[in-house]
Image (spheres, rainbow, N blue to C red):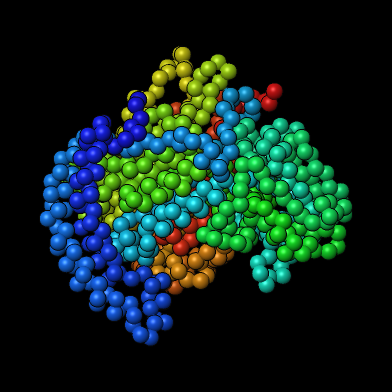
Amino acid sequence: MVLYTSPFPNSFLSVLHSFSWGLIFPCYWLADRLVGSFVPTTYEKRQRADDPCYFHALCIIITTPIYLALLVASLPFALIGFLLWSPLQSARRPYIYSRLKDKNHANGATLLTEWKAAGSGKSFCFGSANVCLLPDSLARFNNVFNTQARAKEIGRRIRNGASRPQIKIYIDSPTNTSISAASFSSLVSPQAGDNRTVNAGIKRTTSMEYKGDNCGSNNGEENREDKGGSGEPHEGEENTCIVRINGEENGHMSDTETDTGNGQARASGPAEPSLEGDAEISKTPNHKQKEGDSGSLDSCSASRESLVKVRVGDGTVDQSTVNNKLLYKASIMKKTSVRKKKHTDETFDHEISAFFPANLDFLCLQEVFDKRAAEKLKEQLHHYFEYIVYDVGVYSCHGCCSFKFVNSGLLFASRYPVMDAAYHCYPNGRGMDSLASKGALFLKVQVGSTPQDQRIVGYISCTHLQAIAGDTTVRCEQLDMLQDWLSEFRKSTSSSSTANPEELVAFDVLCGDLNFDNCSSEDKLEQQHSLFTHYKDPCRAGPGEDKPWAIGTLLDPEGLYDEEVCTPDNLQKVLESEEGRKGYLVYPTSKNHSSSQKGRKASLKGNGRRIDYMLYSEEGLYLEWKVEVEEFSFITQLAGLTDHLPVAMRLVVSTGEDDP
């Protein structure tokens, strides 16, 4: 299948389209500004409350007649442009495929080595987020604004979070239960003015030196007691350092041992100070400290999840010294050898994280409707992802039943090459949703090859369903179409037979904003849909019931700019408590309760409305391989930029073979 690298088949149509849009744009921009000036966000309201001179009101009075006059003057040109633009959409392609040509531009990403399926397995990390990049006037109805600046900042935060080195810390202590997979914030640096020390489970640690050049090695030689070997470094886990801490029952450690051959550091009992007694972490060759590394733009301080509290001997290292020598922010994934968790029946790690996962392989975004914002977002993501599919959808009356003013809002980014792509538009959209070409994007990616030159591929699907509450029938119809399109795409892109397989399927993942949750009484039909018999939801215990650790992904728009949740760290802290979730998440609705009644959610079911999904299937994969979830994350790094929580899932494909 040919991937479309331009929206039109020839340059003449592209020039004509640019000319027609140039005639439309002034009218579009003026209308957007005019409407936006009358829809303030809570952030702007708070700023204006401190303005005794009503300066903003005066500006609106002056600028509104000017905007109206210019809008009227631009209407004739916009009409001519529309008459040219609309018929051109019949020749427009359904997406644009962008591949980064200059590899030096991707300064935040590690170079991928081709997976040969020769080791015990490989992990793949998937992320999904609704980023609410609508035209500014429409975005304000969701209490977010400045779409162009938000697009750039969203892209910067995502690639900064994903390009961090990954540090895995294993705690070998029979009495240590302080580190829980539900929250990875127990082994962290204190904030300013916070004199908290490390949890009592680890009373003394040693200074640990991170050798960036050695941590990318995957030759782990020590056996781990983790389930299914999940504690072993999988093939292709780039930029990863593993730290093992052996502790006695009283929490004290013995001597520090650093295995520079396989990138593992072992820490135990009274430590001998190294590097002049200070904890120092070396900068890796493929990671540079960037603005926004701690989650927000121009941040000069590290997030509490990015720093490890280090003690040497009986004295604590001065925090300013640690901060001065910390040259990058690291992702900390804490596991215990016996996997002592709050929810002991769970087989994988789960967390609320202030960062996108390190070594993120695939990213699916929804509501990237604004084309200028999509370009800015793409430029930022290309610092980490080599392959991007954007501007997905149809316009005008082409391909759908009703007129479409904006595209589907879907965007896909990958570190692995895209082999095939297809898009389908839902023809049954209603209300405001019918003005957008909401649909599903299907992709086939190549993630490696076998020694016998068989391609190793994966399937990823991204979608956004009908949003209007009460449209249960519409969403169920869209789920039916989604399953049919998935089956058709698999058949049309498969180049192998059972008898002579030319390619091996490693994973099949479906993600997106499905606009229903698993606990609301109004969403029972969707909860019982047959899709969930073919795809597994790691957060779902059954129809109508989520697992205890799963939280909602829809934030209360009114509280987006509250000081308690306006930064990734603050939002993470709030969501880790039940009371905090009740104050800042939208909760499932029932016949007797209203989700809009903030503060009256105690009797409602679940931990918030989880409408952003990450599903995977075990059907249609290579029979000798096994797919398991290694980690699931709810991410707060986009705090203040969108009204949704991103989600991420790391899958491990186990080949059943031993390392050579």
* 321 or 593, nearer to the observer: 321
Nearer to us in this view, 211 or 487: 211
Q: Is residue 77 left or right of residue 337?
A: left
Q: Position of residue 578 (x, y in %)?
A: 54, 65
Quadrant of the frame with the N terminus: top left
Where is residue 590 shown, x and y percent of the image?
36, 63
The quadrant in which residue 35 appears is bottom left
Write the residue at 58% across / 58% down: 294
Q: Residue at horizontal 37%, vertical 47%?
A: 375
- Residue 49 visible somewhere in the drawing: yes
Residue at (16% x, 58% y) in the render = 74
Instruction: From the viewer's perspective, tell me whether residue 268 is left or right of residue 226.
Output: right
Relative to residue 431, is residue 558 depicted above or below? below
Residue that extends furthest to the top in the rendered view of this protein:
499
- Residue at x 41% of width, y 65% of height: 556
Horizontal and vertical percent position of residue 479: 32, 42
Q: Position of residue 334 (x, y in %)?
A: 67, 50
